[in-house]
């Protein structure tokens, strides 16, 4: 009896231990039934049966274990759903993986794994389901070789040239149906390899060939990016893949049912997928839109034109916007005597499926090879790295040529007469002395006329009052808004605003900035607003007014102040914002009394909100926006102490491929301005990162960077924070009144990241994406270098630049 009791007890204990142990491997004598799961060793991925979306069908798949809502990354029985809960997953004795269902145990999916003995199946922390011989490390089969709609780090898109395995991207038919849809991503290995997305059997979009950094036509990948791209092309295989520098980061590339793809990163703090990169879609994305030898530029209207030296094959069709017939040469070639080459810059290289390539040639060797073959119509370097390497030759019509920001040079064979015509139209040439004299006189006359016109315009503008100038700005805004469907600003009448502010009474005045006075108002519907009037004596306010309409009107994010509308009536021009009852951050953190009400949890919440706002400006918005005046007084706080970035009067927009710009007129606030901006006038998103770093250290310490003093030394705040960090006393930077409420690890991490953000050289500072990930992920941080700071005696000479302790463009309501 006692033996039976011990046996029962042993079984119960064994069952409990089995339940508590993560199972990532199954053998031939084990099964996974509907309701059971396999979990990878670090509990990142989970395998089991699920129902997608609103469907009741059951599929065996893999998903992220700790992410909600469920995000599936791989499905086995995509085309054979199970209609009940009878599904079972098992390993056959020959090594094949099987999904069986129903009372008759019908096989609904099989991996068709090569026969092996003593097989086991294991779900890895990479999300890869593998089959191997027990006790061995090499894989006999892996799910990574059969992608669905999701690409995970380490997956390959491309071909094994030895076995013939072709790894293709096959998105779901719909969010409720994981069966293969109408689209497919593949590596086309005809000619020089390139990635295509097909709609059925028809090419929809094309990546262009690999140029050493990325695929031709795509933006370059930043060296500081957490995503590493890799392209392999040798005798055995050709494939593209990506990896992650930080293994704790969850990232996936996803193709939606419409055939467009996004690269996503999971942000644990906000519990949502962040779009790190997405396919840019415009009319020129469509493969071969402009036909053979056509040229597509999305900024032109119409978007299609013929390449220089070519003309429409079917002019009537072309004028009717049917460009499929493409273009033909204007002048026949006269190879080998009468031909030359014209360079086309900043383009996505043409379709390379019928090209010839040599990966070791120089550009000169490439030119010689093409020039000696009359059938060769164009050549280009393959890679843009190392000064340009490799050779691509085209022998047919050039298809899918388009303008891109970071394009390559393409050299196209032309009749010498066409090249001469082009040169003569771009720079007139006179052989006779009389022609030279006439040209010189004409140019001089034109210059004099232009100078006179500029002088008159300048004098006319100087006479304009701010009100007259703002009317011009407003007219331009109205013209712009007619072409922008996203403009949803309201127009407020002067009577409405005057009534809401009690005729702009002093008791409604919130503050004064470079733009002009700011008033609090209440509309008839009960909404509280902040009204900023353009002062009649403000010169810089006109530019601010225009900048606010240009940027904030198009930006919508919970951590950016919302512009509700504007008023431009009579002599008055105003901007109307949502009202922030707690006013600005500086009134809390730098005030001895109010600072006591802002404990550490509030401050950490504010830091994270500022991160989200800047991340939106730099990465997620329609435009890449650099704020240029981030500081505590430009962070507004709503009733729940949620931070909102304000004052876009100095903001600048960057194009997709732009990283930095220069100006001769530096504007901003000392103490927050990055050194390269203050000294050289160079600004970029890293300028905002510097300002953010200063702001973080101010929030932690409750002290301003400018005007900071310490009894121990003459350092400013940045130098003081660095000294404490170096001495291992970083926690001493925290205000004494926050010690009881703080979380030490959060404070230390905030100081560490703040110091990384204020590095002297912009290249050493992280991007805001990296900052967000560093705050979100509990990972090791790089050691900061000595930050950029100027002691009171070493402030650079700023007599020629517009910097002040309080900028002239303080737009936030006080």
Image (spheres, rainbow, N blue to C red):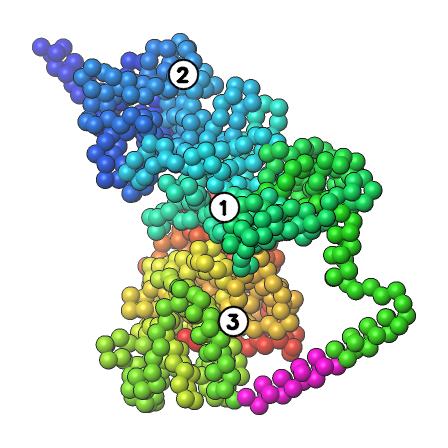
Report the span colored magenta. Answer: 447-464
Instruction: Answer above or below: position of 712 versus 403.
Output: below
Mark 3, residue position: 650
Assign a secondary structure to mark 2: loop
Residue 455 counted in the magenta span: yes
The first of marks 3 and 2 along the sequence is: 2
Residue 708 visible somewhere in the drawing: no
Depth check, front residue: 597 or 450: 450
Q: For the N terminus, which image quadrant?
A: top left
> Residue 49, image x and y in percent?
26, 29
Instruction: Answer above or below: position of 99 versus 558.
Output: above
Assign a secondary structure to mark 3: loop
In 3D space, how far apart are the residues under numbered discs 2 and 1 (Cα atoms)? Answer: 38 Å
In 3D space, how far apart are the residues under numbered discs 3 and 2 (Cα atoms)? Answer: 62 Å
The first of marks 2 and 1 along the sequence is: 2
The first of marks 3 and 1 along the sequence is: 1
Mark 1, residue position: 286
Disc marking residue 113: 2
Query: Within the image, what quadrant is residue 563 found in?
Result: bottom left
Depth check, front residue: 373 or 90: 373
Instruction: Answer above or below: position of 307 versus 552.
Output: above
| Residues at discs 3 and 2 in contact (Cβ within 8 Å) | no
């Amino acid at each position: 009896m006692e033996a039976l009791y011990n046996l029962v007890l042993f079984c119960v204990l064994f069952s409990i231990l089995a339940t508590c142990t993560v199972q990532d491997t199954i053998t031939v004598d084990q099964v996974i039934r509907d309701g059971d799961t396999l979990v990878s060793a670090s509990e990142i991925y989970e395998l089991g049966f699920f129902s997608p979306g609103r469907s009741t069908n059951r599929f065996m798949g893999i998903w992220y274990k700790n992410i909600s809502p469920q995000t599936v990354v791989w499905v086995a029985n995509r085309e054979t759903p199970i209609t009940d809960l009878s599904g079972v997953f098992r390993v056959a004795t020959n090594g094949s993986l099987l999904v069986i269902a129903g009372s008759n145990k019908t096989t609904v999916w099989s991996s068709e794994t090569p026969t092996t003995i003593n097989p086991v199946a294991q779900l890895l922390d990479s999300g890869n389901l593998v089959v191997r011989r027990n006790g061995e490390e090499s894989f006999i089969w892996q799910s990574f070789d059969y992608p669905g709609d999701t690409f995970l780090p380490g997956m390959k898109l491309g071909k094994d040239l030895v076995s013939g395995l072709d790894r293709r991207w096959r998105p779901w038919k719909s969010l409720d149906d994981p069966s293969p849809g109408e689209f497919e991503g593949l590596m086309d290995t005809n000619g020089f390899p390139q990635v295509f997305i097909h709609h059925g059997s028809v090419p929809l979009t094309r990546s262009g060939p690999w140029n050493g950094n990325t695929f031709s036509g795509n933006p370059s990948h930043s060296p500081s990016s957490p995503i590493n791209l890799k392209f392999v092309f040798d005798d055995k295989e050709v494939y593209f893949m990506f990896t992650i520098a930080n293994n704790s980061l969850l990232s996936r590339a996803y193709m939606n049912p419409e055939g467009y793809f996004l690269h996503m990163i999971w942000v644990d703090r906000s519990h949502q997928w962040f779009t790190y990169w997405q396919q840019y879609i415009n009319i020129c994305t469509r493969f071969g839109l402009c036909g053979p030898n056509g040229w597509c530029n999305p900024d032109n209207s119409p978007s299609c034109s013929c390449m220089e030296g070519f003309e429409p094959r079917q002019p009537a069709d072309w004028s009717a916007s049917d460009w499929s017939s493409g273009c033909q040469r204007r002048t026949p070639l006269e190879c080998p005597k009468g031909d030359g080459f014209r360079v086309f810059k900043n383009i996505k290289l043409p379709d390379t499926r019928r090209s010839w390539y040599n990966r070791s040639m120089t550009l000169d060797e490439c030119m010689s090879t093409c020039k000696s073959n009359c059938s060769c119509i164009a050549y280009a370097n393959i890679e843009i790295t190392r000064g340009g390497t490799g050779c691509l030759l085209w022998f047919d019509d050039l298809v899918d040529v388009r303008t891109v920001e970071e394009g390559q040079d393409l050299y196209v064979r032309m009749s010498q007469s066409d090249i001469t015509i082009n040169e003569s139209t771009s720079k007139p040439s006179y052989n006779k002395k009389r022609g030279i004299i006439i040209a010189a006189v004409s140019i001089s006359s034109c210059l004099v006329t232009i100078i006179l016109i500029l002088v008159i315009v300048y004098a006319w503008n100087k006479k304009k009052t701010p009100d007259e100038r703002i009317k011009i700005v407003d007219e331009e805004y109205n013209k712009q808004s007619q072409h922008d469907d996203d403009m949803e600003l309201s127009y407020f009448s002067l009577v409405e605003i005057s009534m809401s502010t009690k005729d702009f009474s002093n008791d409604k005045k919130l503050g004064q900035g470079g733009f002009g006075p700011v008033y609090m108002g209440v509309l008839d519907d009960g909404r509280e607003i902040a009204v900023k009037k353009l002062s009649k004596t403000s010169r810089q306010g006109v530019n601010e007014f225009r900048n606010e309409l240009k940027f904030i009107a198009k930006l919508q994010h919970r951590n950016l102040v919302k512009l509700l509308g504007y008023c431009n009536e009579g002599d008055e021009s105003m901007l109307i914002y949502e009202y922030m009852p707690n006013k600005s951050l500086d009134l809390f953190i730098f005030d001895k009394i109010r600072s006591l009400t802002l404990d550490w949890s509030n401050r950490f919440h504010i830091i994270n909100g500022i991160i989200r706002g800047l991340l939106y400006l730099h990465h997620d918005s329609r435009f890449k926006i650099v704020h240029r005046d981030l500081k505590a007084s430009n962070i507004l706080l709503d009733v729940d102490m949620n931070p909102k970035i304000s004052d876009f009067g100095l903001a600048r927009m960057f194009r997709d491929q732009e990283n930095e710009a220069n100006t001769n007129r530096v504007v901003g606030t000392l103490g927050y301005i990055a050194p390269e901006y203050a000294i050289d006038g160079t600004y970029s998103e890293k300028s905002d990162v510097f300002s953010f770093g200063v702001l973080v250290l101010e929030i932690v310490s409750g002290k301003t960077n400018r005007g900071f003093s310490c009894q121990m030394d003459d350092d400013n705040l940045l130098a003081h924070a660095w000294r404490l960090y170096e001495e291992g006393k970083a926690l001493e930077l925290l205000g004494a009144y926050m010690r009881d409420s703080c979380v030490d690890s959060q404070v230390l991490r905030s100081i560490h990241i703040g110091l990384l953000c204020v590095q002297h050289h912009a290249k050493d500072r992280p991007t805001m994406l990296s900052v967000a990930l560093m705050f979100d992920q509990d990972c090791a941080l790089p050691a900061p270098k000595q930050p950029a700071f100027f002691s009171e005696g070493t402030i650079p000479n700023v007599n020629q630049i517009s910097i002040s302790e309080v900028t002239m463009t303080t737009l936030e309501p006080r």
